[in-house]
Amino acid sequence: MNLFSRSTTTLAFIGLGNMGSRIAARLLAAGYGVSVFDKNSVKVAALRGKGATPSDSVAELAKSVQVLISCLTDDQAVRDVYYGSAGVLTNAKPGLVILEMSTVSPATSRELAHKACEAGVQMLDVAISGSTPAAEMGTLTLLAGGNPDVFQAASPIFQTIANKYFHLGPSGAGTTMKMVVNAILGVGIQAIAEAAVLGEKAGLSRDVLLQVLSQTAVIPPALTGKLSKVAREDYSAQFPLPLMNKDFRLILHLASEVQAPMPATRASFQINSEALTVHGDQDFSVVMKFMEALSTESQPTP
């Protein structure tokens, strides 16, 4: 399979949320011709201003491009886009290549790949690891499952939006790896929140604690930047709390399927769910604020 270079490849992008809009912008800036679709006309207009071509439907896109990329909110959104008479697969021209970047269950990825094959379409599940700043800078990590030849052909696209990309195995392997990665991410932020509250309660300065903690080897790169934002009480969403909650549910569902014990993940999911009722669409790092509030509430009455 020939490489999908910017000079010869027509691209479509479906789903212009926090990550999708930034990835599409990177592709446009690199010189790819990109057609876009999103239900939100404001998001479409923003990409049009950067050179994208708006499309009226996903069916229209499926008929007109060589590579179609999607980045959607959940499993049902993926099914809505790809299935049915107006969906991508019904309208795809043979030979279309799909790079499906949504965080969904591995079972959904495998199901979609099977249906794509029946429609004469190739599909990779290409899960994204990284924040919105990483998407803007083109430094994401991509985790792919599916045909290795398609993975190789898509390497010019991957190089435009990521500095690391891995082929993990057959369909569903990419999203399975995303479950592994986000389990660590979710439990990690909870562990940081608990440890920081411990330090605060024991008399350490919050500002100094967070500054020093960010310089230690125990904080992974994905969470280092969170500490500076937490220090400023900035919980504006880069990775919204509801999406982390959704990922926790996917992780624990997969754990149940394969009978993997995950007690720390279950405990973190419980706190995440409680924080969600209070803090809504703020960044998932707001569990720090939630734990600090719990700490205050638990103080004995004088």
Image (cartoon, helix red, strand yellow):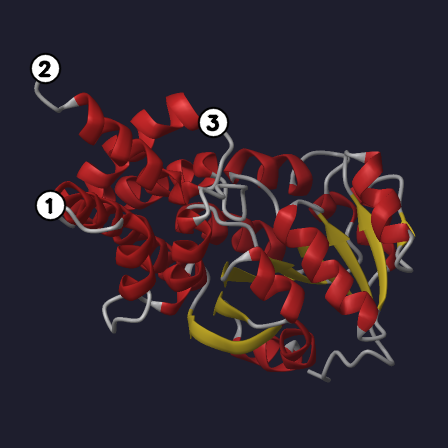
Of residues 71 and 201, which is closer to you in this image? 201
Of residues 180 and 259, which is closer to you in this image? 180
Look at label 3 and name its amino acid: Gly
| Mark earlier in primary sequence (3, 1) | 1
- Judging by the rendered image, the residue that carries numbered circle 2 is 301
- Judging by the rendered image, the residue that carries numbered circle 3 is 280
Residue drawn at x 50%, y 40% as measured from the top left: 240
Q: How crowded is mark 1: few (under 14 residues within 10 Å), some or many (20 or more)?
A: few
Mark 3 against mark 2, which lies toward the viewer? 2
Q: Residues within 10 Å of mark 2 (few under 14, many from 20)?
A: few
Q: Quadrant of residue 28?
A: bottom right
Please state the horizontal and vertical placement of residue 237, each as a whole percent of the image.
54, 42
Judged left or right of residue 147, residue 67 is right
Tell me the CA gap for discs 3 and 1.
29 Å
Residue drawn at x 39%, y 45% as measured from the top left: 285
Instruction: Say if residue 123 shows up in the picture.
Output: no
Q: Do the residues labelled 1 and 2 touch (CB within 8 Å)?
A: no
Please state the horizontal and vertical placement of residue 120, each as a whole percent of the image.
68, 60
Q: What element carries label 2?
A: loop
- Judging by the rendered image, the residue that carries numbered circle 1 is 202
| Mark earlier in primary sequence (3, 2) | 3
Please state the horizontal and vertical placement of residue 128, each as a whole percent of the image.
51, 60
Q: What element carries label 1?
A: loop
